[in-house]
Image (tube, rainbow, N blue to C red):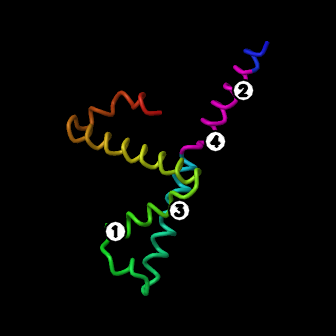
């Protein structure tokens, strides 16, 4: 009886995960957080961060966005989608349009 209840809870979790697009919500959350942090660093011209290079500003903005567990989950989904994009670009470069004829069933 308990195994059936656990199975129903898992099915409910999977259904909500796919219908609510939770990874996409975390991705948008982290990107908005990152862009706001980056714009605040760029807007403050008196701070020592403004005199540093672009790479330092990007890395310090990403470091500031990793202070809560939710933002870390958002970062993992952002890195995951970025890696999937790089994988698709490599497949397109190596195989051309034929790489996408069968669909992308591995990364749904």
* Residue 77, x across and y down, in percent: 48, 45
Q: Looking at the image, which residue sits at the far bottom?
A: 46
Q: Nearer the viewer, mark 4 or mark 1?
A: 1
- Report which residue position mark 2 lands on: 9
N-terminal-most mark, 2 or 4: 2
For the point 43% across and 45% down, which residue is it? 81
Which of these two is toward me, 71 or 67?
Answer: 67
- Report which residue position mark 3 lands on: 32
Q: Point out the stretch of residues depicted in magenta.
A: 6-23
* Residue 65, x across and y down, in percent: 50, 61
Are there few (<14), some (14-19), or many (20+) residues within 10 Å of tag 4? few
Q: Looking at the image, which residue sits at the far left?
A: 94
Are there few (<14), some (14-19), or many (20+) residues within 10 Å of tag 2? few
Q: CA distance from mark 1 to mark 3?
A: 19 Å
Q: CA distance from mark 4 to mark 3?
A: 19 Å
Q: Is residue 9 magenta?
A: yes
CB-based contact (under 8 Å), mark 4 and mark 1? no
N-terminal-most mark, 4 or 3: 4
Are there few (<14), some (14-19), or many (20+) residues within 10 Å of tag 1? few
CB-based contact (under 8 Å), mark 4 and mark 3? no
Q: Is residue 76 magenta?
A: no
- Report which residue position mark 1 lands on: 56
N-terminal-most mark, 1 or 3: 3
């Amino acid at each position: 009886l308990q195994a059936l209840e656990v199975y129903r809870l898992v099915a409910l979790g999977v259904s909500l995960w796919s219908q609510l697009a939770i990874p996409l919500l975390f991705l948008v959350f982290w990107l908005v957080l990152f862009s706001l942090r980056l714009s605040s660093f760029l807007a403050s011209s008196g701070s020592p961060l403004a005199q540093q290079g672009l790479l330092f500003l990007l890395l310090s903005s990403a470091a500031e966005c990793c202070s809560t567990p939710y933002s870390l989950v958002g970062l993992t989904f952002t890195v995951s989608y970025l890696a999937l994009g790089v994988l698709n670009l490599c497949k397109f470069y190596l195989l051309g349009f034929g790489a996408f004829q069968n669909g992308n069933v591995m990364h749904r």
